[in-house]
Amino acid sequence: MLRRLTTLAFALICAPAYAEVPLSGTFTAAEACPALQSISRETNPGNITTQAGTQYELLAGNRTPPTHVRVRVPGAQPDLRWVSIACGSSPALTGEAPSQPTRNAASAPKQHYILAANWQPAFCETAPRKTECRNQRPNSFEATNFTLHGLWPQPKDAEYCDVSNRDRYASQDGRWRDLPQLDLTIAQRRELDVVMPGSASGLDRHEWIKHGTCYDGTQRDYIDASLFLMQALNDSEVAHLFSESIGRRVAIDQVRAAFDASFGRGAGDRVAMDCETDGNRTIITELRIALAGEITSPDDFADLVRAGTPQRHTCRSGHVDAVGLQ
């Protein structure tokens, strides 16, 4: 069971892609250079380039000493980009920076996300023909745990970053098994197939193409982050509330109170609940949780959720469905 895996076991799978070094001041471009969203994948949504002679707000370096700096490019989507230090100059990189407080990690710009977590038995009521819904069992993981729908970088339009038309159309048309398989470790694949039953239908491929390509990291980094978050959620009072309430009605106020109990005051305000009508019932299908910050381990969840954007609820209450089609 994933719930019983330790934080250490997860942390050993893979380390995060970057350890940003906060910087402040300005970076002056000397020429037109690519302004990348991801250094490792060299993604550049919008094919943005710097303009010679233009000063950009300097936010961070990718390491010490840096090979790239993170700057804010007005008008770009997203506007936080990586630029090679060979492209220009900055007093902060030459030791000539004026005396001023150094930007610390707490004040550095945060990446925002929505974690979409399914209650799988309810999802399967709405999609009974899906491969993953045909063989539900009372003792399966998804019977008493949340499952992964996806991790979505924000803003909402951060989708399909540098994706070919072929893959984009396959993703949008639901031909997910036609998409390339993900390059994961054996351990990641094993855990993902448990936490994301929809991978049997190619959901993992779709989520990477649509959302993961806008994540600042590799496929393995993106899946690691998703697994860390799901471990924290399934180890919390929130999962306990749902597993103990199967067959009964749960209100959004109860869900938010469980988030506060597990992750600190205010965490519940970052959660919205989605429901669907199933005959004469309203069933809870998904939680959408707003997060902000760097995802490095399950222990980050409390800080991430409290830093997220408050959410408006779309469903006040619903039944927690039992596994198996009703």
Image (cartoon, rainbow, N blue to C red):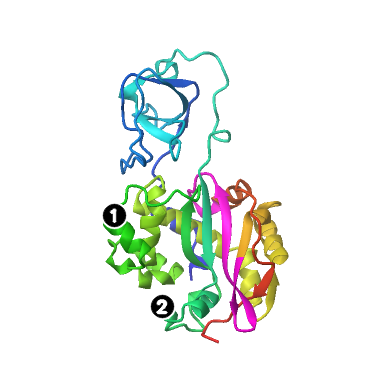
Indicate left or right for 178 with 96 as reference.
Answer: left
Q: Amino acid at mark 1?
A: Asn
Tag 1 residue: 165
How far is mark 1 from mark 2, CA to CA? 25 Å
Q: Quadrant of residue 46?
A: top left
Which residue does the image show at 69% across and 57% down from the upper left? Answer: 260
Q: How many marks?
A: 2
Instruction: Give the quadrant of the C terminus.
Output: bottom right
Tag 2 residue: 130
Is residue 200 found inside the magenta-colored segment of the image? no
Relative to residue 39, is residue 286 depicted above or below?
A: below
Is residue 280 found inside the magenta-colored segment of the image? yes
Which residue does the image show at 35% across and 34% down from the upper left? Answer: 48
Q: Quadrant of residue 174?
A: bottom left
Give coordinates of residue 309: x percent, y percent: 61, 48
What is the magenta range?
Answer: 274-299
Which residue does the image show at 64% across and 81% down from the upper left? Answer: 281
CB contact under 8 Å: marks 1 and 2: no
Q: Quadrant of residue 73?
A: top left
Give coordinates of residue 162: x percent, y percent: 32, 47
